[in-house]
Image (cartoon, rainbow, N blue to C red):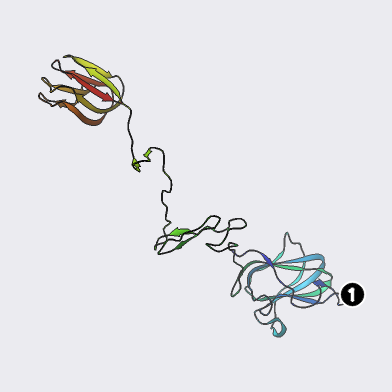
Amino acid sequence: MAAPVSLTQQLGSSSTLGDGSLGTVTSVVFGGVNVDNISFANAAIAIPSGLTVTVQITNDLPDVATWVTLATGITNKPITDPYLVTVPCRGVKLVRTAGSGVTSCTVLQSGGSSSVTAAGNVASGATDSGNPVKVGGVYNSTLPTFTTGQRADLQTDSNGRLIVTQGTLIRGENETLNRMMTIGSSTPTRITTATTTAVKASAGTVVGVFVEVALTGTVTLNDNVTTMIILPIGTIAGFHPFPASFATSLNVITSAHDRLVTLTV
């Protein structure tokens, strides 16, 4: 919807309607092709209580217009409760039938060749000034380069999708290698005997098992009593990742005196 604008008075030196004496006129025209070049879609007419008018409209030039009566006997229509012209037209004429008073006409919605359109006050790439208005984007096959203090259009791809890039590093990144380096913190539990070890008594996640020397027995990881994995005899020394969650608790059963470390979170 266009912003409300007051129409320029077309005829008469005053918008005070009366009997034609003491600076008053008997009719007044607002708008018109040769003045504002605006086609009304919705206009508000304010009429004081001491004035009664006939409302006419036209789509012609006002000075050669054919006027069509829209309503008669209109009075006491303040700006807070105006008479609304909802028929598309290019000119509004108020003809005084009784009394006198000052009238006004405001376009609430316009169309045609000269509709009022809201726009930003500076172009893209120009030095910024005033308050931002528009939120929109533009496609450029080659992205522009701006300098300090310039306003910039949002950039889109050829399909109108907004281009968004990560222009700054976020927490968790390795700034030297320019990559995400997420290193988890885990709790180690060392086991050196043939036994059942309660590693964790609540839900959690196994990171892995570090075997210090090749296994001479088996190592079984249980979620409470449910077997998750079994490391067989002869499992070589080293770290064996096993990222898996357990719902209840983690118990590790070693069948021989092997040395190992479980890592959990």
Q: Measured from the top left, where is residue 197 in percent x and y?
A: 23, 16
Q: Please give the residue where the numbered disc 1 appears in the rendered image.
A: 22
As rendered, which of 218 and 12 lies closer to the eye?
A: 218
Q: Is residue 193 above or below residue 143?
A: above
Q: Measured from the top left, where is residue 230 in percent x and y?
A: 15, 26
As rendered, which of 81 and 90 lies closer to the eye?
A: 90
- Please tell me which residue is depicted at 33% across the width and 42% down the height of the picture: 177
As rendered, which of 251 and 224 lies closer to the eye?
A: 251
Q: Measured from the top left, where is residue 121 in percent x and y?
A: 60, 62
Q: Measured from the top left, where is residue 220 in percent x and y?
A: 17, 22
Q: Is residue 123 above or below residue 188?
A: below
The residue carrying pointer 1 sits among few (fewer than 14), some (14 to 19) or many (20 or more) residues within 10 Å by Cα, namely: few
The quadrant in which residue 202 appears is top left
Q: Is residue 53 above or below residue 63?
A: above
Tell me: 33 left or right of 142: right
The quadrant of the rendering that contains the N terminus is bottom right
- Please tell me which residue is depicted at 74% across the width and 77% down the height of the picture: 10
Instruction: Name the amino acid, label 1.
Output: Leu
The quadrant in which residue 243 appears is top left
Give the mark count: 1
Q: Farthest front residue?
A: 176
Q: Farthest right residue?
A: 22
Tell me: 36 left or right of 220: right
The quadrant of the rendering that contains the C terminus is top left
Tell me: 190 left or right of 182: left
- Please tell me which residue is depicted at 11% across the width and 25% down the height of the picture: 232
Q: Is residue 209 above or below residue 82?
A: above
SS class, disc 1: loop
